[in-house]
Structures are given as C-alpha cells and as structure tokens.
Image: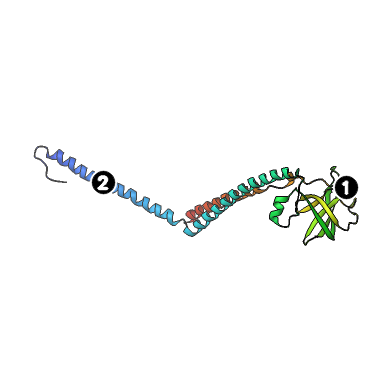
Amino acid sequence: MVGSCSAVAADQHCIDIGWLAHGQGGIAGIRKSQQGPRSGEQRSVTKNIPIIPTIIVVASVLTMIGLGIWQLGRADEKEALIASYSLAKDNTEAVAWPRTEEALEQSLFRRSELICDRVIDRRQTAGTSNKGTKGWAQIARCALDGGGEAEIALGWSRAPEGPQWAGGEVAGLIGPGPKLIADPPRAGLTPLAKPDPKDLPNNHLAYAGQWFFFALTALVIYFLALRKKRQDG
C-alpha cells in the first residue's frame, strides 16, 4: 500500500493502488522467474558443445569444401586442355620430344621426331590398328640420342611376337605415357590407331563430388554425436 487513502473513496482507492502495486511486483516476479531458467538453459546448451572438437570439425569441413571447389576448377581446366589437344592433333609442325611433365602437357598429340640409339627393351600390349582391328601393339624402349629414354609404339601386329628392330630415326604422334606412336610404323608393322584426346579421363568432377560428400558426412556424424551426448547428459 502506497500513501494514505482519501476519506471519500478510501476503500476503492486503496484497493486499486494495492492491486496495482501487488500486480507490478507479481509481473516483475513472473518475468524474473521466466528469464532465469532460459539463461540457465542457454548455458547448458553451450556447455554441451565441446569447443576443441567443434573447431576441428569445422576446419576439416571447410578444408574439404575448398578441395571440392578446387577440383571443380581443375575439371574446367582439363576440359579446356582436351579441347586444345583436339586442335593440336591436326597441327603438322613437329615439336621436340618432351623431357619434363610440363613439356609433355603442352606437347601431347603433336608430331615429334627422335633418334633411338639403342633398343633397351621390347614388350607387347593390347592394341588396335588404324582399321579398328584388335591385336598387339609392339613397344620398344629406347636410349635416346643426347641422353634419356623414350617408349616408341612401332606399330600393330596380329600375333604377339613382333619383328626385330635395331633402332633409328622415328617420327610420329606424342601419346599419353608419354609414348611416340610411330607414323609411319617401323619394322614392317601395320599402323596403329592414332591416339584420341577424347580418351583422356577427366575425373575432377567426380573428385569434387567426393569431397563435398565427405564434408556433408562429417557434419552429419558430428551433429548425431552432439545429439547423443545431450541425451546421455
């Protein structure tokens, strides 16, 4: 009760003021009681989230997403490179035999020439002739004039046993490997099918999908672990 009641309307006036004072105190108490548990609940939720594991998971997820984006960029670069190879195979100007990975990337499907000083090894692998017939590609590994080694696909044969070849000058197309696809063929063999840039794999889009999937999986596992921890706690 605040102040004194007037003589005329003491009862009604005092009831109104008393009710208001009581009501304000009651409302304040209700608000305080409602805010208390909410703050405690927020502290409880924060307490149930482990800081260091959360930082590790977030950093890992961001890294995986970054790798996925990088693979998407690589997919575009590889597609452009394959398109340039498709144009390069029609270029008749010869280039030097590539001796580094960087030079190989710029020289694939271009014509080149080299001199095989000495045949180091011979092998056979499945191959296709320029007419689409399945058979054997005769491969020679050579010591090069000026140092280094190179593999030369001499030509195609129906049987795995190939003719003897002692080396010499060879011209042809630079294929993946790297391997010089002799054109014209050597040792009396049949021409092999020319390498096609469209056969080059471009797996970067699949790699990007894998990284994004790994990131999503990590997040799902982490949130399931948090949920279980809250239920057990």
Q: Secondary structure at mark 1?
A: loop
Closest to the observer, 182 or 77 = 182
Which x, y percent locates residue 185? 86, 49
Which x, y percent locates residue 22? 22, 45
**According to the image, what is the colour scheme of the structure?**
rainbow
Q: Secondary structure at mark 2?
A: helix
Relative to 18, does residue 118 appear above or below in the rendering? below
| Tag 1: amino acid | Thr
Left or right placement of residue 47 versus residue 173 in this view: left
| Tag 2: amino acid | Gly
**Crowdedness of circle 2 by 10 Å Cα count: few (<14), some, many (20+)?**
few
Left or right placement of residue 214 versus residue 135 in this view: left
Query: Residue 190 shows which numbered tag?
Result: 1
Mark 2 vs mark 1: give the one in front. Answer: 1
Task: Give residue 80's quadrant in the image.
Answer: top right
Which x, y percent locates residue 93? 76, 47
Task: Tell me the residue at 21%/42% (across/down).
Answer: 20
Can residue 124 be seen at all in this image of the molecule? no
For mark 2, what is the residue? 26
Number of marks drawn: 2
Q: Earlier in the sequence, mark 2 or mark 1?
A: 2
Direction front: furthest residue: 93
Closest to the observer, 159 or 92 = 92
Which x, y percent locates residue 70? 59, 50
Task: Tell me the residue at 30%/49% (across/down).
Answer: 32
